[in-house]
Structure formats: structure tokens, C-alpha cells
Image: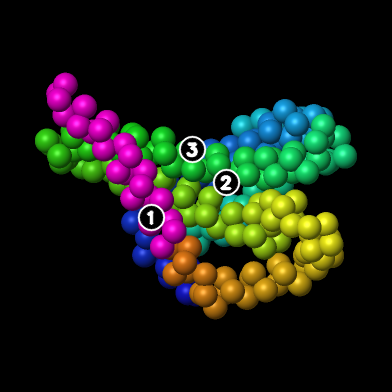
Amino acid sequence: MGILSSFTNLNRYEILARIVIVLLVLPLHEFAHGWVARKCGDDTAEAAGRLTLNPLAHVDPFGAVLLLLTGFGWAKPVPINPARMNHPRKGIIWTSLAGPLSNLLAALVGVILMQIVFPFYHANPNAVLTGIYLLLYWFANINISLAVFNLIPVPPLDGSKVLMMLLPYEKGMWMERHQQQLSLVLWILILVGVLNVPLGYLSYWIMNFFTWATQWIGTLVQMVM
């Protein structure tokens, strides 16, 4: 009931942003993994028909519903075969980073569009411009949160694969052998809310940085209005 209650208390723009994330950004996240893997020599995702932005090829029903209800979720992971990569260790690192980086890129695009819309909203704060601005805000905010969450170095998240490749071989193998136990620890930390503050702070900092770095766009739009 707590999750459903929280969902019903959301504003319609955040709900719409979550729907856009499910249909557009989760597929983009998985496409990015597959595309970088292909560039590294592994065509497994392409052969499986996953090198596409079609949401039907990527959306995981449970992960999609969870994202709609909580703001966090996932798509079906694209199949990756490190043995087919030209340089497996580097390939896994870049392939794993590709997903979160695609979320950050989508968030940056959202913030840039916010900067373009804001001068018009400020001059004439009507309902349409307010809706567009809030939709873009939540779109950027959720993308940043997903990127930060996926970079946690605990299985099965993308950050864990990066960490396993950077650690000495024995420690990396220990992480791989204990993925289930580490995943259980991650879920416990999520459920008790231990990660909320650090993840929220980091997401807030990134959002502020993107806003600061793109302020000149809003200023430029104001000058030509």
C-alpha cells in the first residue's frame, strides 16, 4: 500500500516522465550497452535483435512497473559475450558504463531543453509551458537518479562489472562468485532506505551541475527573444 500511495500522490508530470523513461530511455540504456559491445567486437546483442530502440525488445514488465511506481526499475539486460570482444577487460568496462552514460546524456538533453523553455515560461507562465518545463525537469531528474543507481558497484548493477574488471583478478572473481549474496545485501539496503541520502545527494549535485553548465543557453535565448 505504501508504494501505491506514493504513486497516487505524484504529480501528473512526474508520472508522464516515468512513462517516457520506460518507453524511450530504458531501451536507450540497453541499446547503448549493445552498441558499445558491438564496437568492441561482440555482436551477440545484434544477433539477438536487441540492437534497436524498439521498447518491445527491451522492456521487462516487472522492472517497468517498478519504475512507474517507485522511480527505479530496469529493462531486460542485453546479452553480452566478453569472449567475442577484441579486448574483454576494456570491453566490459566500456560496455557497462555505456548504459549509465546514456542516462546522463538524456538528462543533459532534458536540462538543455529546460533552459530553452524557461525564458518563455518566465515571460508567459501559462499551463502549457509550465507542463513542458515540469515534464523536462522530472525527465532529467529521473535519468540522473537511474545513472547514479546503476553505477553502484554491487551486482547486478553496471557499476559492479566495472569494479570487477578494475580489481585484481582474485578479488574480481570473489565478487563474481558471491553475486547472489551481494545482490541480496543491495536489496536490503534499498528496502531499509540506507542508500536514499547518498544517492539523492549525488543526484542533486549532478542536476545542479548540469543546470549551472547550461545557464548560458537560457541567457542566449532571452537575448534573441
The residue positioned farthest toward the left in the image shown:
123
Q: Residue at x 84, y 62 (%)?
A: 170
Please give the name of the residue rendered at 52% of the width and 43% of the height, measured from the top-left corner.
103
Q: Give the distance between the C-alpha atoms of the residues marked 3 and 2, in whole angstroms.
A: 9 Å
- x then y, percent, for residue 14: 38, 52
Q: Residues within 10 Å of mark 3 (few under 14, many from 20)?
A: some
Residue 36 falls in image quadrant: top right
Q: At label 2, which amino acid type do we have?
A: Pro
Q: CA distance from mark 1 to mark 3?
A: 16 Å
- The answer to whether the residues at label 2 and label 1 have Cβ atoms under 8 Å apart is no
Instruction: Check disc 1: other Cα within 10 Å, few if <14, some if 14-19, many if 20+.
Output: few
Q: Marks 1 and 3: which is nearer the front?
A: 1
| Secondary structure at numbered mark 3 | helix
Which mark's residue is nearer the viewer, 2 or 1? 1
Q: Which residues are magenta?
A: 201-225
What's the magenta bit mostly, secondary-structure-wise?
helix
- Percent x, y for residue 58? 67, 41
Give residue 205's mark. Answer: 1
Which of the two discs, 2 and 1, labels the residue nearer the N terminus?
2
- Front one among 153 and 27: 153
Q: Residue furthest top?
A: 224
Residue where numbered disc 2 is placed: 100
Name the side, left or right, on which 116 lies relative to 29: left
Q: Is residue 198 above or below residue 67?
A: below
Element under disc 1: helix
Q: Nearer the viewer, residue 91 or 54?
A: 91
Query: Which residue does the image show at 63% across and 36% down from the upper left?
Result: 32
| In the image: residue 16, left or right of residue 89 | left
Quadrant where the C terminus is found in the figure:
top left
User: Which residue is denoted by mark 3 in the rendering?
Assistant: 105
Residue 223, image x and y in percent?
15, 25
